[in-house]
Image (cartoon, grey):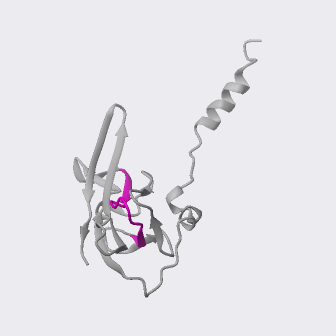
Amino acid sequence: MKYKYLPIILIIILFSCTEKKENSSLNPENWSKRTVNLKASDSLEYGKSYLSIYSQIYSMSEHTTHNLTSMVSMRNTSESDTIYLLRAEYFDTHGKSVRKYFDAPIFLAPMETTEIIIDEVDVSGGTGSNFILEWKIPRNCPEPLFEGIMTSTMGQQGLSFTTHAKRIE
């Protein structure tokens, strides 16, 4: 009688230990809902920004790294205009393209934010990963804001820091 609940407990333990592998930032269906058709005749201003991201940082020495969860926050700072993101491409420490996040321009409504999440277990970018973000905005519209937020927790300790994009074109 004392082993009556053992199978239930084992099933709960088994399912609680499985890791969920869905990576929402990579799911093209999420981006396809935002896709727009931009015409070459549209009078939009073009821009390109560089954003440093860290999927790993060094800890204690150059031989030990600590994995981080990284978020790329893409924000429309305009209260009245829609903006367009043309490209969000992720590069590793060596400058090799890891992935592109969408294949067609997407929109951000006024004051809207969207994110790209790089899971803590995804270390493909390494210690010097970065993004190139291309965008178009209406004339006299404030530029979009791109930030990187890196976080990690181990036990009772937490680590977090931010980076800010720099316009390069």
Q: Is residue 57 above or below residue 154?
A: below
- Which residue is found at the position 43% from the left and 57% from the top? 114
Does residue 53 appear anywhere in the picture?
A: no
- Which residue is found at the position 22% from the left and 47% from the top? 60
Residue 76, position in %: x, y? 36, 61
- Which residue is found at the position 24% from the left and 75% from the top? 168
- Which residue is found at the position 37% from the left and 57% from the top? 73
Residues shaded magenta: 68-89
Residue 6, by quadrant, is: top right
Is residue 1 or residue 46 the one in the foreground?
46
Q: Quadrant of the C terminus?
A: bottom left
139 with respect to 28 (left or right): left
Q: Is residue 22 above or below residue 78?
A: above
Q: Is residue 111 above or below residue 38?
A: above
> What predominant SS class does the magenta segment belong to?
strand
Residue 23, position in %: x, y? 53, 56
Residue 159, position in %: x, y? 29, 42
